[in-house]
Amino acid sequence: MKSDFYKTMQRHHNGKVIPTLLTLTDKRTHAHLRKPVASIFATSTLTHFEPLIDRTIRELIVTLRQDFTDVSGTQKRCDIDHWLSYFAFDVMGEVSFSRSFGFLKNGHDIDNIIKSLSRRFKYCAVVGQMPWLDRLMWKNPLLSWFATKPDPFSVRAVDLFTDRMTKEKVHPSKAGGSGADIVSRILEVKRAHPDQVPDEAVVGYILTMLQAGPDSVSIMLCSIVYYLSKNRGFQSRLQKEMDDARLTYPASWGKVQGLVYLNAVIREAQRIHPPASIPLERIVPLSGLELPNGRTLKPGMIVSMNSWTINQNEKIFGQDAHTFNPDRWLKAEDEAEDQFRARTARMKRADITFGYGSRSCLGKPIAYMEIYKVVPTIFGLFDV
């Protein structure tokens, strides 16, 4: 079971806790909330989201060309981390509501939503080590009386949901969704199983997507762009693979899945710079826990794993674990096939970038689809 660390991430609306897949600590409650919508995020359904992702990729391309390229050859400074973050949030708007949030169009952090989310994560990382402090600070009802501004992130999520639900009730056929977006599909599940998916659960699903999705994707994209820009040899190899594949842009999901070197680059970037740097805490069950080295942990103890620490383990990733090297995910010339499979399987088992087991991130397939499509598009159209 998850520890109380995760309760510091809980969002409140009108004095009530909004249940989200990220913050629920009880396994049964989490499974009950996850089951009705799990099929929406299955890998087999990804093609439904591709047109929505392509729309935002095209907007990113147009923006970068207009603002940062010059026919005269003059170089212009581009703070690409900002634009990749805007892209990730706008994609989530499209995929969730068939509506961009407008970050790319406006060129700035609207209502400081991204800044407030970053500030919130920093707060949780610190206060989460002593969760009882959260009840005295963020969730203190007395302090909320003196709050000058509501949380823009939660307000935005609730407003989008309220707007969609209002349109659903007045004009169901003109609710604003494409029929392919996530909210449309969640509302279909809600209509079929109203007892399993109440209104607050729908808001919880939306908060989960907006809270965890864009930030993780933008961090991974920044990592990829940074390391490929620093290592031109790796970038050239990726570009050659894309040229040989005769990609058109935005790159199609069907083609990019088969690009071996692209896969190695993405895996290595998320290994050396994973999005989550916080410890993933769990409570030892009543049966206790015996570790592989024979040590026994008592029931109720809080244990945690940190992806940054795991990903630097030389026994798993090799003596150069501290360096960016996509080749570690490829078969060496003198390596037997069974040795290669065993080595990569060991590295994949250690990957907790998107969680693990029943608590793995539900939106992982969509996140990977965004990354696998936009990375070759950027490096295929621009000299980075």
Image (cartoon, rainbow, N blue to C red):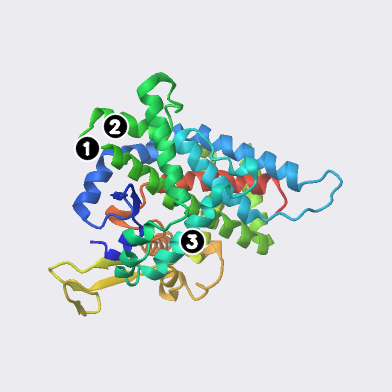
Residue lying furthest left: 287
Q: Position of residue 196 (x, y in %)?
A: 22, 37
- Find the distance from the CA under tag 1 to the CA under tag 3: 33 Å
- Find the distance from the CA under tag 2 to the CA under tag 1: 9 Å
Q: Quadrant of the N terminus?
A: bottom left
Residue pointed to by mark 3: 119
Foreground disc of the pair 1, 3: 3
- Label 1: which secondary element: loop
How many neighbours does mark 1 have within 10 angstroms: few (below 14), some (14-19), or many (20 or more)? some
Residue pointed to by mark 2: 189
Q: Which mark is residue 196?
A: 1
Instruction: Compare marks 3 and 2 and give the one earlier in the sequence.
Output: 3
Q: Amino acid at mark 2?
A: Val
Q: Nearer the viewer, residue 374 or 116?
A: 116
Q: Position of residue 172 (x, y in %)?
A: 38, 21
Q: Are marks 2 and 1 in contact (CB under 8 Å)?
A: yes
- Find the distance from the CA under tag 3 to the CA under tag 2: 34 Å
Q: Which mark is residue 147?
A: none
How many neighbours does mark 3 have within 10 angstroms: few (below 14), some (14-19), or many (20 or more)? few
Q: Amino acid at mark 1?
A: Gln
Q: Amino acid at mark 3?
A: Arg
The residue positioned 43% from the left and 59% from the top of the image is 337
